[in-house]
Image (spheres, grey):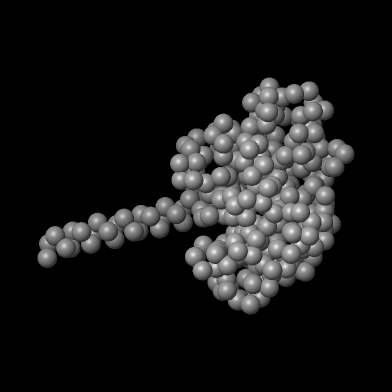
Amino acid sequence: MPLLGSEVLKTIRSGRLTLGLGVHHLRGAATPLIAKAAGFDWLFIDAEHGVITPHEIAQICLAALSTGIAPIVRVCAGALDEGTRALDNGALGIVVPHVDTAARAQELVAAFRYPPLGHRSAGGPHAQFGYRPPPQVQAQASLNEQILVVPMIETPQAVENADAIAAVKGIDALLIGTNDLMNEMGITANPGHEKVQAAYAKVAQACRRHGKVLGMGGIYDQEWASRYIGMGARFVLGGSDHMLLLDAATKRGEFLRGVAAAAAA
């Protein structure tokens, strides 16, 4: 049986634009269906800032696999074991924040790739194959080839080391966590600052040089999203569930109150 969700992974690796929906508060099996209906390509299941449990992560991943939406999980920086459990239970990729060096990127590869690339333990039922995987050697080779391992670039040190990080075999994309990067630079909430533009240019160049995908998180306004997508960002976080819900609900409330006010005038 082919790997479920493999078409999305191919699209991400091809360098075509793909959009991720941040999952903080949604918990049910409808989550990937909602993402698909809204035109997203992958889920950014956030175990770094959210309070989502491993069980809930697994259930969302399982629900996503048959929808054509790729479930990708962000773990805490010091919780690589949570990443391996997510992979064992349906995730198609792992994002790790605050990766500042090539040595740290190599640790991700060691944790999330099977030998000979890494040292991931052989276990779990391989939900990615619909629980009917090919023989173990073939299954592990397929997962090594297709699952995504993505470090986040969130400090000036990481930007400086972007070329070395991108050169690590087994790394698929470099995702710029723009909010944390701006905080570290002392320019909070200033996505158009020349330092941020220079960081995107440097990381984009590293990705092009080594055939990796440039990712963008934390940029949602039209001007700067357009600018950084124009610079090569293709693995793009389009917004989180609570942010999008609040925005839509606010606009709906304002519209209906406006209608009522006009009717009463």
Q: Is residue 8 above or below residue 195?
A: above
The answer to whether 129 is drawn above or below residue 39 in the figure is above
Q: Quadrant of residue 115?
A: top right
The residue drawn where x is 52% and y is 46% is: 40
Closer-to-camera residue (24/143): 143
x and y percentages locating residue 93 in the rendered image: 68, 43
Place of residue 36 in the rendered image (x, y in percent of width and height, measured from the top left): 50, 41
Which residue is drawn at the image coordinates 76% and 29% (left, top)?
139
Please identify the quarter of the rendering in which residue 143 is found.
Answer: top right
Tell me: 51 left or right of 116. Answer: left
> Which image quarter: residue 246?
bottom left
Indicate whether 8 appears above or below 259. Answer: above
Task: Kindly tell me whether residue 33 is visible in this rendering.
Answer: yes
Report the residue at 40% width, 58% height from top: 247
Q: Quadrant of the C terminus?
A: bottom left
Percent x, y of residue 186: 63, 76
Q: Quadrant of the N terminus?
A: top right
